[in-house]
Amino acid sequence: MITASESLRLRYEDEVNPDGSGDVPDMLAVMLARGSCRSYRDGSVEPGLCSLLCAAALASPTKSDLQQRDIVILQDPAVKAGFVELVGAEAWVRGAPNVAVFCGNNRRQRQLHSLRGHDFVNDHLDAFFNATVDAAIALSAFVTAAEAVGLGCCAISAVRNEAAAVSDLLALPDHVFPVAGLAFGYPAADAPAISMRLPLSATVHQDRYTETDAEAVIKDYDLRRQAQQPYGHQRAPDVFGMVETYCWSEDKSRQYALPERRSFGAFIRSKGFNLT
Amino acid sequence: MITASESLRLRYEDEVNPDGSGDVPDMLAVMLARGSCRSYRDGSVEPGLCSLLCAAALASPTKSDLQQRDIVILQDPAVKAGFVELVGAEAWVRGAPNVAVFCGNNRRQRQLHSLRGHDFVNDHLDAFFNATVDAAIALSAFVTAAEAVGLGCCAISAVRNEAAAVSDLLALPDHVFPVAGLAFGYPAADAPAISMRLPLSATVHQDRYTETDAEAVIKDYDLRRQAQQPYGHQRAPDVFGMVETYCWSEDKSRQYALPERRSFGAFIRSKGFNLT
């Protein structure tokens, strides 16, 4: 594994300089060296290890001890094939040996109210928000745990493109919704590609949100990424044409210049959430 | 530190049995042994370590490489005092030596569009959702990283109660919003209390969401928690009275039987989000 100092330099240039990488605990070194894994060796992760990872994931913080998240592990080949059919536009998803879907769950909370005879009086955006955050926290902890034992992971946010169909496939009841899928397994390569991040000077603020020449920050980041991790292809050239210098800001703004997920809000409302 | 086997037993009884705790990697053992920390020794975390933790937190997965999250570190005593004034209804928050606020940031994405001349055509629930999930993932990774180096943490979801005021305090611009605060520091006690979790048989599903006698699951969990971690006081007895046997489901349903955060949706909309 590369050292923490090397990971830090790749991600943030010279912004963070621990006094010698030996000072960085192993666990942080693993977290700094992580990257998405989209290519796996054959063979699924044994059920005992899956359980252990779920146990670690669900030991993560949960808002007010409410535990508003669930994990669905796809094992049945027919269910996994159905999932891939829905969200597997990218070929690598088809090769993922294991898939989990992290769900927000506000259903149980409402069951507590029925059981105890107290009205649930907070049926507004907060209910959806809290369950979303809880699920994302568990997803993140699962990824850290999985990577710590040598597995590779890649989140599948495309479940949001087909949220209703994924929900039907997994038989999610009212007030339960998919937040993200996660592919995981034994990686085909020794080490993942490390993705450069925006400079901490732009994303970590002292006391107040501070923005100094956002355009310059983005352009500089574009250039550094282009030098280090150039894009292999341009997105939707039929719509946007080809440009000479293709960069992060171009790719990301093209991505959200194409409509997607317009039905996501309707789906969430159909699950019983009130987003006022 | 207690062993992974002990943590697993405290959290999940006998649901997960690794073959001897020696088989559980250290990092998972740390994650399993974690718990919220609300009591800290004097002394703040040195800035270099804070940076390292932010670097690790922001190395976590981010939807489509968009990095829609920022961290605000509170350092100025006046800002921290203002924060505590807003969200410190619980006394322990006042004693937290370090506070960070994790924010969703959809602002930068929109800046990319302006810069590159592509319309942002996905101005609906997805924009808020993605930034929320990104921030929560980073929060979770920060907690894991901090706990790995021996710090204690406790998320502060009360920022959602006072989202507009917190946003003003931290000068958050449009399309940037607080997801959660996080207290962290050197813990006063050697080990945190480990919180029992709902059984994995109820929260981890195979292929499809499966619910078998939810009431029995909740009642059994109530009883086990009561035996292991009884509540020290009853919530809002002036409203609900006192009951003989006070349990998790009673506490949680009382909590959401009292109105809160009704203005959260209005706040998010005021930040420029369209939640349709």
Image (cartoon, coloured by chain):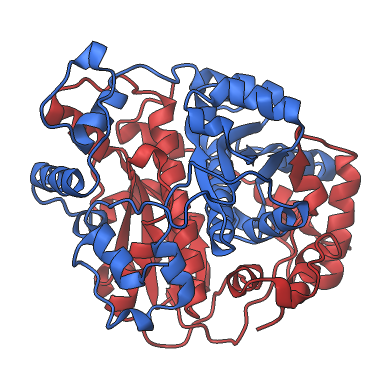
Chain colours: A blue, B red
Residue at 72% from the left image edge and 78% from the top image edge: B22
Q: Position of residue A147 (x, y in %)?
A: 54, 58
Percent coordinates x, y for residue A119 in the rendering: 72, 38
Give the side of residue B141 with respect to residue B127, left or right: right
Q: Position of residue B85 (x, y in %)?
A: 38, 65
Q: Nearer the viewer, residue B60 or A115?
A: B60
Q: Is residue A172 above or below residue B267?
A: above
- A35 up-or-down from A114: above or below: below
- Res. A207 visible in picture: no
Q: Residue furthest top?
A: A238
Q: Identify which residue, B196 or B241, lies in the foreground.
A: B196
Q: Give the quadrant of residue A116.
A: top right
Q: Is residue A142 above or below residue A98?
A: below
Q: Nearer the viewer, residue B213 or B140?
A: B140
Q: Quadrant of residue A173?
A: top right
The quarter of the rendered structure image containing the N terminus of chain A is bottom left
Q: Quadrant of residue A246?
A: top left
Above or below, A235 relative to B241? above
Task: Count the numbered circles shown.
Answer: 0
Q: Position of residue A227 (x, y in %)?
A: 16, 47
Along the line of sight, the residue nearer the viewer: A30 or A126: A30
Residue A86 horizontal side relative to residue A198, left or right? right
Q: Residue at x 10, y 27 (%)?
A: A244
